[in-house]
Image (spheres, rainbow, N blue to C red):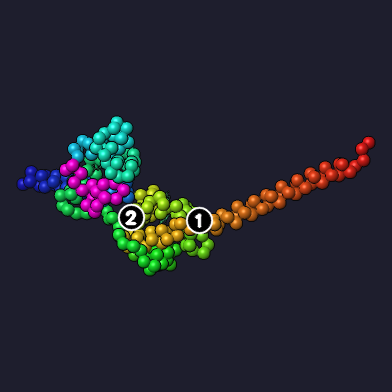
Amino acid sequence: MLRHFRTTAWCLAIAAGASLAAQDAEALFRKSCMSCHTIGAGPKTGPDLKGVLQRRSREWALGFIQSPGSYFDKGDATALQLLKEFNNVKMPELGISAADADALLKLIDELTKSGKVLGSKGIDRPPTALDIQKGKLMFEGRLRFAGGGPACISCHTATGAGIAGGGLLGPQLNAAPGKYGKNLATTIENPAFPTMVNVFAKKALTPEEAFQVASFLNSVGTQPAPKKDILFPIVGLVGLVGSLELGRRLGRKRFRGVRKNLTPKA
Ligand code: HEC
Ligand code: HEC
C-alpha cells in the first residue's frame, strides 16, 4: 500500500516536472524562435520545424540549434543547402544551451506527433484602406488591442502617426517594412525584441491586429521620415542659442579687432 502510494507520488512528481519543462520550452520557443519559425504553420524566415527529427538526426538538430554558425563555417552540406533555400538568411547564434536545445526538440517532436500548431504565418491578403486606417488607430492607441497591449506610439514614432510624434524608447519604425519585408506582421505578432517580449508576453496582438498595424506601417514606409517632433525643436533651440552665442563672441572679437585697428599706432 505504502509502496503503491510512493510510486504514485513519484509519477505525479515526474509528470509535474515534465509539464513544467514543456511550458518552459514553449515560452523559450515563443521568445527566441517564433519570429522566424512555426511548428506546423509553414515556413517563415526559416523552415517549418514540424517533423525536423524525421528529416535530420537528433545530433545534427541539437548541434545546429546551439550553434548554427559553426555548421556554416565548417561547410556542412545540409546547413548550406538550407541557407540557399532560405535566401541566405543565416539563423543567428542565440546562445541556446544543450539542455534547452533538447527541451525545444522535445517540444517540436510532441507537437509534430499531436498535430498541434505553434506560431502563425499571419494573414495573406492585400490590405484594404480599412485595414490601414484601423492599423493607424491601433498604433496611436485610439483603437484598443483586444489583448490589452499598450499602443505602439507610447514607445515608437512613425510617419503619419499622432500629431506630436511618439515615444522614444523604441526605434523610429519607418525602416521596419524594408527590414522585415513580408514578415513584418508576424514579427509584430510575436516580437522577439527584449523590451517588447515582456510587455506583450500575455497581451499579444491577434494575427488580424498585427496585420493591420503592419499594413499601416507599410503604407507609410516609403514616405520621408518624420521630423523628430520632440527632439527636433530642442536640438534646434540648442543649435540656435549656440550659434547666437558664437556669433556674439566672434562679433566681439571682430569688434575688438576693429577697435584695435582704430587705436592710433604709437
Ligand atoms: C532570425 C531568424 C531565426 C531565428 C530567431 C531562429 N532561426 Fe532557426 N533557422 C533560421 C533559418 C533562416 C534557417 C535555415 C538555415 C539558415 O539559412 O540559417 C533555420 C534553420 C533551423 C533548423 C533546421 C531546420 C531544418 O529543416 O533542418 C532548426 C532545427 C532551427 N532552425 C531551430 C531553431 C530554434 C529551436 C530556434 C530558437 C531557439 C531558432 N531556430 C531560431 C532562422 C532562424
Ligand atoms: C514598451 C515599449 C514598446 C512598445 C509599447 C512597443 N515597442 Fe516595439 N520596440 C521597443 C524597443 C525598445 C525596441 C528596440 C528593441 C529592444 O530594445 O527591445 C522595439 C523594436 C520594435 C521593432 C523592430 C524595429 C527594428 O528596426 O528592428 C518593431 C518592428 C516594433 N518594435 C514594432 C512595434 C509595434 C508595431 C508596436 C505596437 C503593437 C510596438 N512595437 C510596441 C519598445 C516598444
- Image quadrant in which the C terminus is located: top right
Residue matched to label 1:
225
Magenta stretch secondary structure, dominant? loop
Apparent side of residue 203 relative to residue 153 in the rendered image (left or right): left
- What residue is shown with label 2? 186
**How far is disc 2 from disc 1 in space, using C-alphas?**
23 Å
Residue depicted at x 79% and y 44%: 253
Residue at x 21%, y 35% (from the top left corner): 59
Identified by mark 2, the residue type is Thr
Q: Tell me, yes or no, whether the two marked residues, 2 and 1, touch with CB atoms within 8 Å.
A: no
Where in the figure is residue 175, as x and y percent of width and height?
A: 44, 52
Q: Is residue 174 left or right of residue 31?
A: right
Taking the spot 47% from the left edge, 54% from the top edge, the residue there is 172
Residue 47 in the image, given as x and y percentages of width and height: 26, 47
Residue 13 picture location, percent across and down: 17, 46
Badge 1 crowding class, 10 Å Cα cut-off, few under 14, some 14 to 19, many 20 or more, is some
Residue furthest out toward the right: 266
Residue 83 numbered tag: none
Judge from the rendering whether residue 89 lies leftward or rightward of residue 49; answer left or right.
right
Vertical relation: 237 (above or below) 14: below
